[in-house]
Amino acid sequence: MPRIPRKLRMEPIVEVVTELRFQSGDKGKISLLPGLIFNQFGKSFPNMEALAIPPIELEAFATSPTHRFHGADGIISVSRRTTAFGVVRPYPGWEIFRERAYAVFKFVAQSGTFGEIDRISIKYINLLPATPTEDQLALTNATINVGGRILNNENFSLRAEFPKNGLTGIVQIITRAQTMPTERAPEPLEGIVLDIDVIADGPFASKDIDGAMKMLDAAHTYEKELFFSLLNPSELEKYGPEY
């Protein structure tokens, strides 16, 4: 396993999302949660958006967001079973990101809206810039052989799961990807995506947010391990690793 940098001076991160998922909730309190969140965090997340979802309360839609709150500090989203916090580029760094996520998760967990915490997860979407004609896979340590054909600049997506110590790391590699322009990052990027999602399964007690956050820290550490193991050493040097 290569040395893991403490941070990168230039980040390839385009989006980060952490999600707290609950086993069940009080229907009456769930309907009040968007208002409670806006009252608590409205100064930092002043733009509330109600999302169109099917009115039928099927389990398949239980994790589909019903409301989003946008602001300079990031995005909060809620559903009938989840609360999530995320940011798009530029990434503020783990310490700031964790502090903001903790504030949101602690408030929701202590609101009495939900029961036990079912799981906590974190997902990093990284994009390594490259033109469509480049050997994009060469930016990584991955070698993919399909029926004797070694992939390099082909258009493809790959998904694999890597369990470790109660965590599940889900890695997706997508070539010839392009970001959508946003207000904070109006210039689109294109290249190869390394999408890494790490899930820590509970259950955790509903108010044991500190225990859940410890698992989030472990998930974050594992995410870094997976990402840096995938990155070609010469590509890593472009981002200015600090150890």
Image (tube, helix red, strand yellow):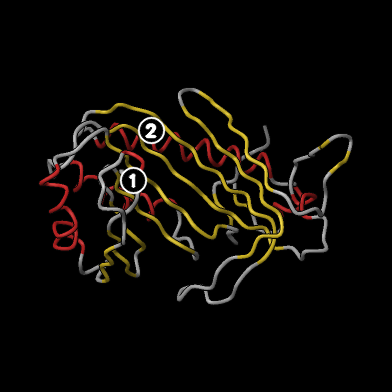
Of callouts 1 and 2, which one flags the residue occurring earlier in the amino acid sequence? Answer: 1
Q: How many marks?
A: 2
Give the residue at the far right of this rendering.
Answer: 148
Amino acid at pointer 1: Phe
How far from the left and from the top, in percent, is residue 96?
Answer: 37, 55
Residue at 42% over, 60% down: 87
Residue 215: image tag: 2
In the rendered image, which residue does mark 1 sit on?
61
Residue placed most toward the observer, 174 or 63? 63
Q: Is residue 71 left or right of residue 6?
A: left
Give the residue at the far front of this rendering.
Answer: 56
Location of residue 20 (image quadrant):
top left
How far from the left and from the top, in percent, is residue 79?
Answer: 28, 49
Q: Is residue 88 left or right of residue 157?
A: left
Residue at 60% over, 38% down: 226
How far from the left and from the top, in percent, is residue 159?
Answer: 63, 39
Q: Is residue 135 left or right of residue 83?
A: right
Q: Vertically, is 74 above or below 23?
A: below
Secondary structure found at label 2: helix
Quadrant for the N terminus, please: top right
Amino acid at pointer 2: Met
